[in-house]
Structures are given as structure tokens and as C-alpha cells.
């Protein structure tokens, strides 16, 4: 067992006094959202104030929460998808056009994660690969198609992902957090991914859906499927969502 694998779990904050992060060097803050073209095909989502879901007490949701790998062949509504997206990465406030405060915590409010969706069965949305733009609460289409075989292959044969209504895929743009925390960023990015996925577990459970966090996948296949370079942006976590009995 390689020792270096455990080092990411350790705290080395004192070393930041020696190896200064870019923030301390007065290098400008990186963008808090990945750029997108205004000419993209946008999918309007249901605005947070018009979402009327999840009216179940927190204790009941926590008691029911578990990883679910069997889904019914039923569609998610656009309202349900909007609810899941907003409460896993929704932007509540933007400060000085530099920092976002969202529905999930993040180390230093750096929010290094981007949310992609592989949609199979959502009402009024074509099958395909999409990206969530949390600042405007919309989806943009990346490419249309049925990617069930590709997602199963990329997740080492886990067939239930291809049987879900939608697969959430989170990428990290590490420099957003490296800018502030240098080498300590990689631990906090992993922790941030856990925050996001736990919110997905709880929101899904509250609308009679289920999910299962996935960390076992082929890195190159997943990066290629999503269309990221695997260095400046890379896949770090996945979770399929579907209706349950």
C-alpha cells in the first residue's frame, strides 16, 4: 500500500505559510463558473420559488436514506430535476462578481465543481448530455443522444446507471480551490463532492427517488464522455437518479 495515498487525508495547513497560494501572490481570482456560449441551446428550469416539492420532514428523509440501485421505468418531471439541481449546486448569492454562495458548503466558497447530466428519461427534455449553469439556473445542451452504453462501459459495467432517469456527473476544476489553498485544495475538493452528493441523496429521497454515489469508473472514458481534458477539469464523482417504488 503506497503511503502517498493516505497523505491527502492529512492536514498540512501550516505549510501554506511557506508555500504561498496564488491568492496570497495577488494573482486574480479564477472564474467561479465555467464559461459558456450565449448561442448555446438552453433548457429553462423551474425557478426555485416555483418548486413545490420535498414537503417531508428531515427526520423521515434521513431515516429512509440509503443507496438505491433499482429504479422504475418512469420519467422525472422537469420540476423534480430543477429541484435536485438547485439544492445540490444552486447559487443563492453572488458577491462582487467574484464569489458565490450556494445551497451546499464549499471550502472558502471556492465551489470547484461543475454539474453535468446524462439524461435518459426526463419529461420534455431530449436524451443527451447537458451542463447545469447554476448562476442562471438553466441547462445547456452539449450533445444529443442515448449514452446508456457509454456510461455503463465507463463505470466498469455497472448496468443500473443506464437504467436510471438521469446520471449526475460532477467534475472538478481544481484551480478554483488551488488558487486559495494550494496543495490543500485536493482534500477539500473531495470533501466538497461529498457535500453535494449528500444533498442529492436527501433531496432525491424526499421526492420518491433514489440515488447511489459512484466513485468506481474509468477516468479516461468518463473524461472523454463528458468532454473534459482530465487535468484542468476532470470527473470526480457520479450518481444516477431514478424513481423508486
Image: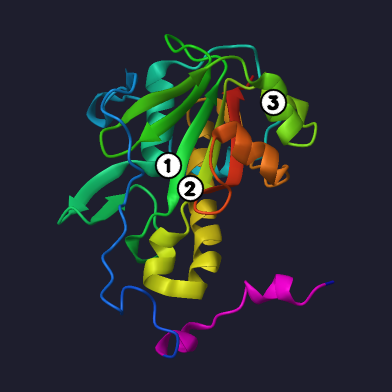
N-term-proximal mark, 3 vs 1 = 1
Task: Tell me the SS state at disc 3.
Answer: helix
Q: Is residue 111 magenta?
A: no
Q: Is residue 201 visible?
A: no
Q: Is residue 14 above or below residue 229?
A: below
Q: Residue at x 64, y 42 (%)?
A: 213
Name the residue beneath numbered marker 1.
88
**Would you say the residues marked 3 and 1 are in contact, meaning their CB atoms lie under 8 Å apart?**
no
* Residue range (magenta): 2-17
Q: Residue at x 41, y 89 (%)?
A: 17
N-term-proximal mark, 3 vs 2 = 3
Task: Tell me the SS state at disc 2.
Answer: helix
Residue 56 location in percent, x, y? 43, 33
Residue 215 location in percent, x, y? 68, 47
Quarter of the image where one finds residue 99? bottom left
**Would you say the residues marked 1 and 2 are in contact, meaning their CB atoms lie under 8 Å apart?**
yes
Name the residue beneath numbered marker 2.
196
Name the residue beneath numbered marker 3.
150
Q: Residue at x 85, y 71 (%)?
A: 1
| Image depth: mark 3 or mark 1 in front | 3
N-term-proximal mark, 1 vs 2 = 1
Q: Is residue 126 above or below residue 168?
A: above
Amino acid at each position: 500500500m503506497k503511503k502517498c495515498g493516505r497523505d491527502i487525508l492529512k492536514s498540512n495547513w501550516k505549510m501554506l505559510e511557506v508555500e504561498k497560494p496564488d491568492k496570497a501572490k495577488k494573482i486574480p481570482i479564477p472564474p467561479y463558473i465555467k464559461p459558456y456560449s450565449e448561442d448555446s441551446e438552453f433548457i429553462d428550469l423551474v425557478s426555485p420559488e416555483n418548486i413545490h416539492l420535498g414537503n417531508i420532514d428531515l427526520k423521515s428523509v434521513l431515516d429512509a436514506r440509503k443507496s438505491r440501485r433499482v429504479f422504475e421505468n418512469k420519467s422525472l418531471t422537469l420540476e423534480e430535476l430543477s429541484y435536485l439541481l438547485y439544492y445540490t449546486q444552486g447559487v443563492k448569492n453572488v458577491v462582487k462578481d467574484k464569489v458565490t454562495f450556494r445551497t451546499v458548503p464549499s471550502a472558502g466558497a471556492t465551489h470547484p465543481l461543475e454539474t453535468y447530466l446524462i439524461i435518459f428519461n426526463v419529461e420534455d427534455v431530449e436524451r443527451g448530455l447537458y451542463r447545469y449553469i447554476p448562476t442562471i439556473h438553466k441547462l445547456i445542451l452539449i450533445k444529443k443522444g442515448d449514452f446508456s452504453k457509454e456510461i455503463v462501459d465507463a463505470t466498469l459495467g455497472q448496468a443500473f446507471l443506464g437504467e436510471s432517469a438521469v446520471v449526475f456527473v460532477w467534475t472538478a476544476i481544481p484551480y478554483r480551490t488551488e488558487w486559495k489553498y494550494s496543495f490543500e485544495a485536493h482534500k477539500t475538493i473531495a470533501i466538497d463532492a461529498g457535500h453535494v452528493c449528500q444533498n442529492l441523496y436527501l433531496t432525491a429521497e424526499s421526492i420518491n427517488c433514489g440515488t447511489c454515489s459512484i466513485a468506481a469508473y474509468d477516468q479516461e472514458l468518463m473524461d472523454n464522455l463528458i468532454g473534459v481534458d482530465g487535468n484542468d477539469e476532470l470527473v470526480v464523482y457520479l450518481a444516477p437518479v431514478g424513481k423508486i417504488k
